[in-house]
Each structure stands twice: as structure tokens, then as C-alpha cells.
Image (cartoon, rainbow, N blue to C red):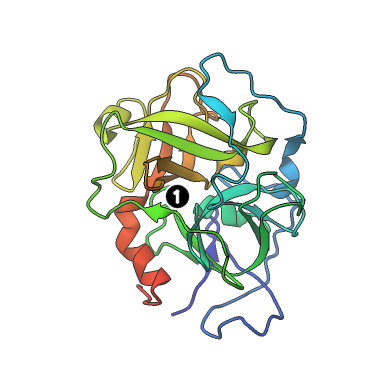
């Protein structure tokens, strides 16, 4: 099976170039012609577009937005062009050697994952592991089935997050969930220095479709005050927190004008592709 990374907005193939001896021969690695400094169309992400707010302090009277306590959500990864550079997307560790992310994130110059890191850049904590291959979901189209799996050069020592069941039993209308990333909630193209979390309430697709068009591969949360999904959250985890461990139910995908008040935030629904994820993680290729 040939693995190819595809731009979500332009459907242009990109992947990684590397001289590593550990790269498997059945993955393809054409060199990306997309540099971090290039302008990238709507729905895509480029590293140079973001300003890191190193002294950002969340100001939210509702208390729903806060800094993640350091070392508590180590399955969250930042995607970077260099080991210590700025993370321009978030991802989730789903096996020791695989990350789950949205396809719109791979438009940028992905080379490294910083797993378990609290900060948007630097190498002072976490693990910086090279990304050696990218696989899009075979039915990715626009933001439908907005999933990509990244393969790591070596296993991470951190514990992967549990995945939502294929039967969707982990999600219901009114379910409380938490999304994470380096979004500072200050608007488009700004990043927080520390990993942030935001509590959200999931809603049914029927309710969501009163405001935006969604399909069965998508999951929504209500468009309440202070709820946003912006630059630093893209691709990041949406989890249901449980006493025995977090369950990954979605990845941040899109929203109206960076979480415009009154409009839902939309995520990619993990349960809808659980069989595909298992097939890749377990080494079975689906075409």
C-alpha cells in the first residue's frame, strides 16, 4: 500500500524526506515543496503564520479555559518543523508509534512531534521524535473524514490515549468533554505558550445542523460564550475524562470564524473511523 499525504484544501500530495535507515520501504516520502514561510490557503496551516504569546494568561470568568497542569496530558503532541520550533498543530498519541491528527495540519512542514510537552516550543520537556510517514484517511474530502495518521521513527515512552468505541457509546447529546491545544483564544494566528484546555458540551448532529452542515464523520459542541477552536487547537484531542483514563472522542477540525459566538465548534468523530485506525495501528492496510 502506498502512503501519501494530501493537502486538505488543495489535494496536493506531500510527505517527508529522510535519510533514516529505520524508514519502512512500503511508505512513500516525496519531499514537500511547502516551506514554513509560504502562504497556505484557508483550511490549511503554516508555521510562520502564528505569533506565540509567551506571557499569555487566560482571562475567562467562566473558568472553562485554563492551563493544563504540566505532565498530566502527556498523550498530547505538538507538530513542528524542527525539534525545538513552534508547534503549529496538536495531535494525539494513539499507539507508541502513531499520532492521530487532522488532514489540514499536514499542509505545513511536518518533520517532528514533541510528545508530552507542556510548552509550544523548545525541548525542555517531553520527547522530540521524528515523523517518518503520513497516511490520510482514504475517504478524506474537505473536512469530511478529516483524519491523518503519522508514523514515528521510534516508540514514545508515554502512554497512548484510549480511543472511543466504534459503536459511539462514548458520545451523547449533552456529554461534557475537554479539548486541548496551544490556542490562546485571542483569535486567528496566535498561539499560547502553555498547553491549554477548554471544557465543552457535545451536541447531537441534528442540533448542530441547525447552524452548520455536518456529516456522520463529524462531532459538534455547542457554540456557547468563550468557546473557540482556533489555530493552536487544530488536530488536537477532544476527550471525555474518566477516572480510569481519558477517552479520545474527537480531533479539532473546524468552526465558524475561529469559534464565532453562537456557532458550534466541529470536530472529527473518532468512533466513525475506529476500524480504520485499528487497521493501521495493527499493521493491516485498508485501501
Give the residue drawn at x 58%, y 18%: 60
Q: Position of residue 87 (x, y in %)?
A: 68, 48
Q: Residue at x 67, y 85 (%)?
A: 21
Q: Quadrant of residue 140?
A: bottom left
How many marks can you see?
A: 1
**Left or right of residue 251: residue 176:** left
Give x and y (percent) for residue 185: 61, 27
Counting from the top left corner in percent of width and height, residue 98 is at: 51, 65
**Residue 258 seen by the camera:** yes
Residue placed farthest to the top in the image? 61
Quarter of the image where the C terminus is located: bottom left
Q: Determine the image quadrant of residue 205.
A: top left
Question: Compared with residue 153, is residue 233 higher up or lower down, i.e. above or below?
Answer: above
The residue that appears at 50% across and 73% down in the rendered structure is 3
Residue lying at the far front of the rendered structure: 243
Q: Position of residue 261 (x, y in %)?
A: 48, 19
Label 1 crowding class (10 Å Cα cut-off): few <14, some 14-19, many 20+? some
SS for dot 1: loop
For label 1, the residue is 142
Front residue (pair 169, 37): 169
Residue at 37% in and 41% down: 242
Foreground: 99 or 17?
Answer: 99
Tell me the quadrant of the picture where the N terminus can be found.
bottom left
Asked if residue 110 shows in the view, the reply is no
Amino acid at each position: 500500500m502506498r502512503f501519501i499525504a494530501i493537502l486538505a484544501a488543495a489535494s496536493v500530495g506531500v510527505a517527508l524526506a529522510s535519510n533514516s535507515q529505520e524508514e519502512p520501504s512500503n511508505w512513500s516520502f516525496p519531499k514537500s515543496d511547502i516551506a514554513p514561510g509560504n502562504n497556505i490557503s484557508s483550511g490549511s496551516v503554516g508555521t510562520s503564520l502564528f505569533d506565540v504569546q509567551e506571557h499569555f494568561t487566560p482571562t475567562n470568568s467562566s473558568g472553562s479555559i485554563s492551563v493544563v497542569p504540566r505532565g498530566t496530558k502527556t498523550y498530547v503532541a505538538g507538530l513542528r518543523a524542527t525539534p525545538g520550533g513552534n508547534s503549529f498543530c496538536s495531535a494525539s498519541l494513539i499507539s507508541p508509534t502513531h499520532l492521530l491528527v487532522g488532514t489540514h495540519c499536514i499542509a505545513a512542514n511536518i518533520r517532528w512531534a514533541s510528545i508530552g510537552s507542556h510548552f509550544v516550543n523548545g525541548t525542555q520537556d517531553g520527547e522530540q521524535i521524528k515523523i517518518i510517514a503520513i497516511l490520510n484517511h482514504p475517504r478524506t474530502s474537505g473536512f469530511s473524514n478529516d483524519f491523518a495518521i503519522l508514523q514515528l521513527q521510534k516508540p514514545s515512552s508515554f502512554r497512548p490515549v484510549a480511543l472511543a468505541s466504534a459503536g459511539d457509546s462514548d458520545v451523547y447529546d449533552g456529554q461534557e468533554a475537554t479539548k486541548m491545544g496551544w490556542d490562546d483564544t485571542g483569535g486567528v494566528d496566535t498561539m499560547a505558550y502553555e498547553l491549554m484546555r477548554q471544557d465543552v458540551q457535545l451536541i447531537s448532529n441534528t442540533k448542530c445542523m441547525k447552524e452548520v452542515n455536518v456529516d456522520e464523520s463529524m462531532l459538534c459542541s455547542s457554540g456557547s460564550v468563550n468557546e473557540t477552536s482556533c489555530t493552536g487547537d487544530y488536530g488536537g484531542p477532544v476527550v471525555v475524562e474518566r477516572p480510569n483514563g481519558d477517552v479520545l472522542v474527537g480531533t479539532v477540525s473546524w468552526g465558524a470564524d475561529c469559534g464565532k459566538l453562537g456557532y458550534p465548534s466541529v470536530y472529527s468523530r473518532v468512533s466513525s473511523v475506529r476500524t480504520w485506525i485499528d487497521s493501521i495501528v495493527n499493521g493491516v492496510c485498508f485501501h
